[in-house]
Amino acid sequence: MGFRDRREKRQEEREAFGRGGSANRFQMRQKLISIGDDYWIENEDGERVFRVDGKAMRLRKTLDLEDAHGNQICRIQTRVLHIRDSMAIEDPDGEQLALVHKALVSPLRDRWKVDLAEGDDWKVQGNIIDHEYEIEADGRKIAEVSKKWFRVRDTYGVEVAPGENSALVLGVTVAVDTMVHPEN
């Protein structure tokens, strides 16, 4: 990849992400005290568009991503008997859409992998613990997660590139957050 290619890639990212970009923006604000980890995901206009419904009293950590009307979009659930932490994202019919798991070797930075049922696998890398990371597919950024835009505790933003499946990206973000912060 030459300098021109890198410059063009950065220009495309600036057009999609950041202030004035065309990315879909969401704000995730986790409830501090709740039974079952319930919280809302709002769009950039402050409208509640998705709800994460944590299921209490289950053997496996289970979260449902629902639309604003309560219709289930996907289920995010821990997988047992795996060598490393992993969570599966399934559609309402129980078909697996993605498997999110920590990379085996990540010496310099936090890295996670998303094995998709269809399409190229995604890479999640950056400072996962502090909510400062990117999701990439085939070398291009499809989402950016950042806490730097907010001063409120347990609030962070997710920018999703135009044309990407926002619900799946948010499901991956919820899965990664749940595995990194299991006490929440």
Image (tube, rainbow, N blue to C red):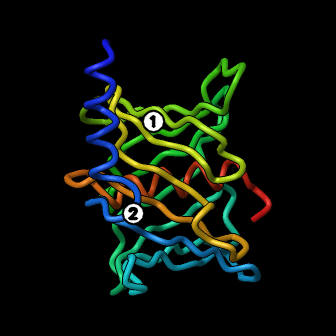
Residue 21: x, y in percent? 30, 59
In this picture, residue 148 sits left or right of residue 143: right
Residue that carries the numbered disc 2 in the rendered image: 19
- For this orientation, the residue located farthest to the top is 2
Query: Callout 2: helix, strand or loop?
Result: loop
Quarter of the image for residue 85 reads: top right
Q: Quadrant of the C terminus?
A: bottom right
User: Residue 86, how many percent across, how many down?
Assistant: 59, 39
**Residue at position x 76%, y 82% in the image:** 33
Residue type, mark 1 in image: Val
Q: Nearer the viewer, residue 136 or 85?
A: 136
* Screen quadrant of the N terminus: top left
Residue 105 marker: none
The correct choice, above or below, for 110 with respect to 68 in the image is above
Q: Is residue 42 left or right of residue 37?
A: left
Amino acid at dot 2: Arg
Q: Secondary structure at mark 1?
A: strand
Nearer the N terminus, badge 1 or badge 2?
2
Task: Judge by depth and name the residue closer to the eye, 104 or 10.
Answer: 10
- The nearer-to-camera label among 1 and 2 is 2
Number of marks in picture? 2
Q: Residue at x 67, y 29 (%)?
A: 109
Pick whichever, 28 or 80, lies toward us. 28
- Residue drawn 45% across the image and 56% down it: 171
Image mark for residue 114 = 1
Q: Position of residue 32 (x, y in %)?
A: 74, 79
Residue 104 position (above or below residue 174): above
